[in-house]
Image (cartoon, rainbow, N blue to C red):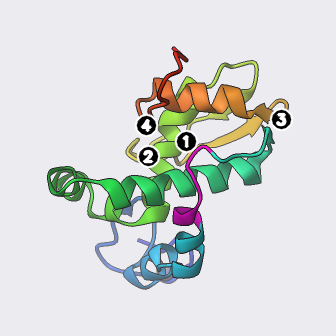
Amino acid sequence: MICEKCRRKFPGLALGPFGIVCQECMRLVVSEDPPLYEKLLAEHVLDLPLFLDIDDFERAMLKLSVHFLKSATPDQAIRLRNQNVYLMYPRPMALQLKDQVLEMIPLMYVSSMPAEGRNNVFCTGTYQFKKPLPKEVLVKAMVKAKLVKVEGEDLA
Ligand SMILES: [Zn+2]
């Protein structure tokens, strides 16, 4: 098998969260980014721009991921680990959360193309926003995906 990132050949290379990548590339992909994560943790999950473009959305999902991992109970952490060890890392976890959230965003805002022949633990497909995504719509999608709770408001 050939690593999709560095294009080197490795025996026994298997499909992982970022496609077919060697261990060396995987280490780079999941490598920690502490200053950014700390910054994201200092922000509230729902402190978001009023309208989000793709970059804003990606950042929002990474923020959701670091908050999610930080607040995971030991039981949840074990379950994640059993599901896929990479889910212990913010970036791969963000991919999975993104997938769950995108599914809940009305089609008038987003078009997505799931990748074929890949496992669906991770969002490996591509997506586009048809127009800037209102914060309100994103928050509803996160609530619907049961990823955040908004107290005192019925967003369902
Ligand atoms: Zn590689």
Please report whichever mark, 2 or 3, sits nearer to the chain's N-terminal start: 2
Residue type for callout 4: Leu
- State if disc 3 and disc 4 touch (CB < 8 Å): no
| Cα–Cα gap, marks 2 and 3 | 28 Å
Please report whichever mark, 4 or 3, sits nearer to the chain's N-terminal start: 3
- State if disc 1 and disc 4 touch (CB < 8 Å): no
**For this rendering, which residue is in front, 41 or 146?**
41
- Assign a secondary structure to mark 1: loop
Q: Position of residue 97 (x, y in %)?
A: 47, 44
Residue type for callout 1: Ala
Judge from the rendering whether residue 135 lies leftward or rightward of residue 145; answer left or right: right
Which residue in the protein does label 1 denote?
115
Residue type for callout 2: Arg
Which residue in the protein does label 3 denote?
132
Judge from the rendering whether residue 135 lies leftward or rightward of residue 27; answer left or right: right
> Label 2: few (<14), some or many (≥20) within 10 Å?
some
2 vs 4, front mark: 4
Please report whichever mark, 2 or 4, sits nearer to the chain's N-terminal start: 2
Give the residues in magenta.
40-46
